[in-house]
Image (cartoon, coloured by chain):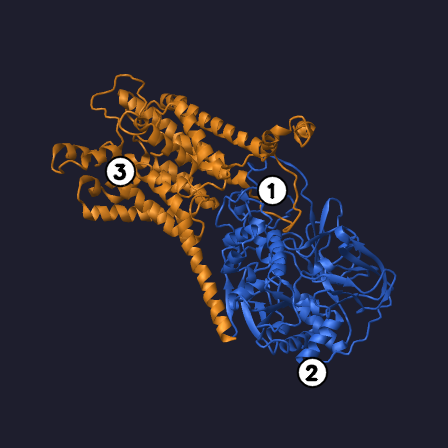
């Protein structure tokens, strides 16, 4: 059953500031749980400002799936609940007491239901996402299979081989409990060159698939599409190995422990490296003294799919990378006419194509203005799924549900279109189009 | 300069004195300076390419054909007068003579076309999209040199308004804008677009004995009704042999009469190379259209019912607007097929039909324009069936999945 998939279409963008494989500690005092990290979730708070919490205390739950709890990453006190428009909850800020006391769980893994209950109650459940719609999985569903990706291919993102080193027993435990939740197989997808860790290569109780090729080969949706594409009516749960290991650790220790190694990378980082921290930690503590903050963009996650945060922002629930790059808020005289040896492009319209090995300091400039679609065959070069991306996007813009379904909307997530957005001559905001459409369709089709 | 623009920018913004002219201002502003706009949603970094870069690359690719066209205009003129007969002679004179006639056409085409685009931009409140940068260069290159400037202007207005803006502007048009201009002239003023009076600027001067003024294709079309053994037919076909006016060498180099930019396969080849290296034009369309033309030409060659069909297939492709059309016009991404499979089909049919029309229908001595326009209209249909294939594959999978569970 195990497959070898070679992904031919894609693009590796070489950027400066790859995190060196050394680790240092960090100690954040302020943390946050961001409901915006979880697509398809409507939060309902259970605690108020000023409440004392332990690591693992439920802070809010999902109104649509009330069993699923979202928990505090550390022990301390809820300092502030930040709200946006229409009182939408943006961040629940927690100040740590430094004691790191954990709420006691005693998870049972005797049956499928016990596993699901334990994951929901402990706040571990949100690690599991689902296709279609790329939202948090529904514990009431029976997934056809579960797909786990063991590697990141997005530029500058954390290398799971390194960040999860030595956590073999947690990882295996995580796979074992996942296997109890599906009627099908758990697929673990490793990369033919990037994955070297025996922990991944020799994992048991799973179907191991070998993937080769450039980004987006690490995207679980791309792997899913190549190995066993989902059809209407099917559900597949997806997660990455960080989620699996964290879940496994929870079953081994009974603690809500979301500590992780975080890659601090990018051209504005003085010494790109790994830092030990927690989900939700304030990035200031992680990047302190190591980043030129002047005219910088901080991103929780990678440069293609990450979330823009400010210097006081927090690491996302799913993220294990903080990227810092230059803001490109400068005009360039006749920029569209110059030879452009410092510009990166998939097309060979800039002379930089003569230097294939070159690594770039790309900034956040848009390099042009929004235009109608003119160029064709651009997205297809970086979109490996068996789907016509432009046609699907146009169906999304028209919100033609029937057409979207026919063209494969159930198989995609915004991240799968990140490279399309990157290469787009017309500067179309593709990921936003897909996310908005998925959110709307999720409601309309429910 | 940057400060200068910044100073006047507020005048053009909403509520400013010249709010209406914002598209005009913005177009100049962004032409001079790539804006400082940064990514706000989605991917934080972006590819260096934009539509300006794309379009300027295509314009650059057409420059060799333009320069050659300027020279050839002069060359043909002096040939008709019996002066500077050798190719290398009178380089300066030929260039100057050509430039005097060709550059006004280019200027009128750009001036009128961009003017119309600005009017629509102001009316609809959007800044100028760069599509016309390419159309504005294509239009002069596919016209006969003696086209009056007012006709160029009328055709350009027609093409931009009816061919493009009514469909929603750049990126939305069904058929190629430049070819719309040419088709308009072809049907509105047929005497100015074909025959043997329009291809060479003679200025009414006395021409040498034996001067015909026809194009290779015009002469070939003339042989169709003739007996192959007749002297007239033989005379015509002699011109295509080595040493003749339309010899393979002359056709490839482009030393023959024709529309301004279409004659030199070498100059067009240089442009094609740039388009293929940069990846701007679809290599699938380029390759398949040339293959399609070749297949048709070979079939005719095998059939061999008249002198036109009997022409060497490679030679057939080097004549008229075939190479220019396949490199610069069939590959227009907006009007061509958009799927990879569709592009193979589309390209092949463009080439195939171009030669078919050319040889079969003496009323249209050149079939390239018809073929591309026809396939432009058909391209969405081709894509539709290619995409249907993908859809039905997905549907079958879904049925299989639901029958198993």
Name the foreground residue: A46 vs A445.
Answer: A445
The secondary structure type at the circle numbered 1 is loop
Residue at mark 2: chain: A
Sequence-first disc among 2 and 1: 2
Task: Say which residue label 3 marks.
Answer: B248
Nearer to us: label 1 or label 3 = 1
Which chain contains the residue that carries disc 3? Answer: B
The chain coloured blue in the image:
A
- Callouts 2 and 1 on one subunit: yes
> Which residue occupies the foreground of this view, A120 or B234?
A120
Q: Which mark is residue A367?
A: 1
Can residue B276 be seen? Answer: yes
Which residue matches tag 2? A110
- Asked if residue A131 is positioned above or below residue B368 in the image, the reply reads below
Say left or right for B114 vs A253.
left
Q: Residue furthest top?
A: B205
Q: Label 2 crowding class (10 Å Cα cut-off): few <14, some 14-19, many 20+?
A: few
């Amino acid at each position: 059953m195990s497959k070898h998939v070679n992904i031919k279409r894609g693009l590796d963008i070489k950027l400066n500031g790859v995190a060196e494989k050394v680790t240092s500690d960090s100690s954040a005092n302020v943390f946050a749980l961001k409901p915006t990290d979880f697509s398809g979730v409507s939060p309902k708070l259970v605690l108020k400002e000023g409440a004392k919490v332990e690591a693992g205390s439920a802070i809010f739950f999902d109104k649509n799936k009330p069993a699923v709890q979202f928990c505090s990453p550390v022990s301390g006190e809820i300092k502030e609940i930040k709200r946006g428009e229409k009182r939408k909850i943006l961040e629940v800020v927690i100040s740590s007491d430094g004691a790191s006391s954990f709420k006691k769980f005693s998870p049972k893994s005797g049956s499928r239901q016990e596993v699901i209950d334990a994951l929901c109650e402990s706040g571990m459940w949100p690690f599991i996402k689902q296709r279609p719609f790329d939202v948090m999985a529904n514990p009431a569903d029976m997934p056809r299979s579960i797909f786990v990706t063991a590697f990141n291919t997005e530029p500058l993102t954390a290398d799971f081989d390194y960040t999860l080193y030595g956590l073999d027993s947690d990882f295996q435990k995580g796979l074992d409990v996942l296997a109890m939740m599906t009627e099908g197989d758990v697929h673990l997808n490793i990369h033919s060159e990037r994955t070297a860790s025996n922990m991944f290569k020799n994992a048991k109780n799973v179907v191991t698939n070998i993937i080769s090729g450039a980004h987006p080969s690490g995207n679980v949706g791309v792997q899913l599409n190549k190995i066993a594409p989902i059809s209407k009516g099917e559900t597949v749960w997806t997660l990455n190995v960080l989620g699996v290991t964290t879940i496994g650790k929870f079953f081994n220790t009974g603690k809500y422990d979301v500590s992780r190694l975080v890659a601090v990378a990018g051209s504005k980082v003085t010494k790109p490296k790994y830092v030990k921290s927690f989900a939700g930690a304030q990035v200031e503590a992680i990047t302190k003294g190591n980043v030129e903050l002047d005219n910088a963009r901080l991103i929780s996650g990678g440069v293609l799919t990450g979330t823009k945060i400010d210097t006081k922002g927090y690491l996302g629930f799913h993220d294990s990378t903080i990227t810092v790059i230059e803001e490109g808020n400068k005009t360039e005289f006749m920029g569209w006419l110059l030879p452009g040896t410092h510009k990166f492009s998939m097309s060979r319209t800039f002379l930089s194509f003569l230097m294939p090995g070159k690594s770039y300091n790309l900034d956040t400039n848009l390099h042009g203005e929004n235009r109608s679609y003119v160029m064709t065959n651009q997205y297809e070069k970086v979109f490996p799924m068996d789907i016509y991306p432009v046609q699907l996007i146009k169906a999304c813009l028209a919100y033609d549900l029937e057409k979207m379904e026919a063209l494969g909307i159930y198989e995609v997530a915004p991240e799968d279109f990140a490279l399309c957005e990157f290469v787009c001559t017309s500067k179309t905001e593709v990921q936003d189009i897909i996310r908005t459409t998925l959110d709307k369709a999720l409601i309309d089709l429910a | 300069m940057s400060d200068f623009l910044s100073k006047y920018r507020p005048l053009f913004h909403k509520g400013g004195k010249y709010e209406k002219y914002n598209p005009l201002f913005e177009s100049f502003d962004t032409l001079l300076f790539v804006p400082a706009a940064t990514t706000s949603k989605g991917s934080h970094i972006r590819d260096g390419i934009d539509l300006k870069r794309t379009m300027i690359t295509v314009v650059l690719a057409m420059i060799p054909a333009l320069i050659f066209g300027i020279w050839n205009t002069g060359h043909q003129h002096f040939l008709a007068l019996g002066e500077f007969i050798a190719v290398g002679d009178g380089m300066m004179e030929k260039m100057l003579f050509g430039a005097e006639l060709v550059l006004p056409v280019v200027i009128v085409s750009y001036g009128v076309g961009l003017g119309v685009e600005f009017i629509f931009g102001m009316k609809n409140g959007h800044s100028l999209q760069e599509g016309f940068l390419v159309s504005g260069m294509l239009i002069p290159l596919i016209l006969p040199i003696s086209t009056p400037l007012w006709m160029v202007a009328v055709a350009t207005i027609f093409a931009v308004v009816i061919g493009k803006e009514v469909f929603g502007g750049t990126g939305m048009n069904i058929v190629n804008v430049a070819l719309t201009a040419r088709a308009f002239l072809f049907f509105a003023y047929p005497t100015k677009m074909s025959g043997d009076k329009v291809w060479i600027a003679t200025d009414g001067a006395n021409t040498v004995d034996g001067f015909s003024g026809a194009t290779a294709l015009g002469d070939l079309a003339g042989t169709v009704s003739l007996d192959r053994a007749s002297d007239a037919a033989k005379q015509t076909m002699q011109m295509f042999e080595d040493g003749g006016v339309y010899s393979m060498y002359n056709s490839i180099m482009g030393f023959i009469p024709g529309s301004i930019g279409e004659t030199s396969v070498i100059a067009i080849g240089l442009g094609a190379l740039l388009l293929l290296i940069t990846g701007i034009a679809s290599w699938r369309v380029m390759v398949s259209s040339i293959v399609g033309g070749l297949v048709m030409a070979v079939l005719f060659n095998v059939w061999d019912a008249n002198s036109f069909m009997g022409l060497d297939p490679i030679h057939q492709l080097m004549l008229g607007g075939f190479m220019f059309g396949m490199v610069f016009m069939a590959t227009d991404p907006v009007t061509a097929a958009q799927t990879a499979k569709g592009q193979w089909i589309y390209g092949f049919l463009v080439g195939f039909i171009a030669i078919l029309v050319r040889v079969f229908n003496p009323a249209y001595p050149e079939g390239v324009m018809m073929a591309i326009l026809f396939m432009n209209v058909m391209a969405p249909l081709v894509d539709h069936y290619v995409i249907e294939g993908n859809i039905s594959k997905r549907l079958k999978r879904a049925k299989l999945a639901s029958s198993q569970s």
